[in-house]
Amino acid sequence: MTTPAPERLALHQALATCRSHRDGLVDALTDMPQPPTDAYALEHLARGDRRVLDQFAYRYTRLQDDMGSRLLPAILRALGEDVAVMSTIDRLARLEQLGWIPSADEWLGNLCTTPPTRSWRRVQGQYRFVGWDRNRC
């Protein structure tokens, strides 16, 4: 079955948006040599480093939001699934069944419970299917 043009277009647009956020994250990770690891370091960030950290936080949040609200539903719609009646958990479970993600529970758990000091490394691996390249960071 060929994916209809509107679903294919929505998928390409969602993927392009997520890749743009990914590029912003890569830039932020590249520009900040050492992320702050405690409250003291965070309070004493240089102005430029604070801007980089703000950019990272913005892009990280936008990437999560756009993946959940645009990319994952677009993938399922392109595969012929009816996502209108699916909750986010149901969408993730279906993507796991289809082999697009290894574990819905792990995916959701990583988004909700990743400790801040570890999230810098986790974000590099969590979004591989939007074209994340670990070696660029």
Image (spheres, rainbow, N blue to C red):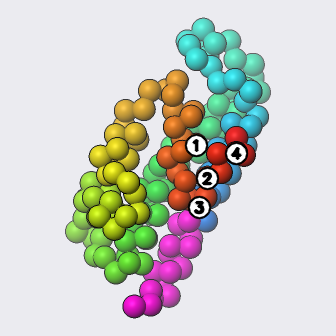
- The quarter of the picture where residue 55 lies is top right
- Tag 3's secondary structure? helix
Separation (CA) of disc 3 from disc 2: 13 Å
Q: Give the number of the disc on residue 17.
A: 3
Q: Residues within 10 Å of mark 1 (few under 14, many from 20)?
A: some
Q: Which residue is mark 4?
A: 135
Is residue 34 in view from this perspective?
yes
Residue 65 sits inside the magenta stretch: no
Q: Earlier in the sequence, mark 3 or mark 1?
A: 3
Q: Are marks 3 and 1 in contact (CB under 8 Å)?
A: no
Q: Position of residue 131 (x, y in %)?
A: 61, 58
Separation (CA) of disc 1 from disc 2: 7 Å
Q: Position of residue 98 (x, y in %)?
A: 34, 68
Q: Are marks 4 and 1 in contact (CB under 8 Å)?
A: no
Separation (CA) of disc 4 from disc 1: 9 Å
Q: Earlier in the sequence, mark 4 or mark 1?
A: 1
User: Is most of the magenta stretch helix, strand or loop?
Assistant: helix
Q: Position of residue 14 (x, y in %)?
A: 53, 66
Separation (CA) of disc 4 from disc 2: 9 Å
- Tag 2's secondary structure? loop
Say what amino acid the circle numbered 2 marks.
Trp
Q: Give the number of the disc on residue 124.
A: 1
Q: Quadrant of the C terminus?
A: top right
Q: Are marks 1 and 2 in contact (CB under 8 Å)?
A: yes
Q: Position of residue 121 (x, y in %)?
A: 56, 34
State the residue lying farthest toward the top: 40
Q: Which residue is mark 2?
A: 132
Residue range highlighted in magenta? 1-15
Say what amino acid the circle numbered 1 marks.
Gln
Say what amino acid the circle numbered 4 marks.
Asn
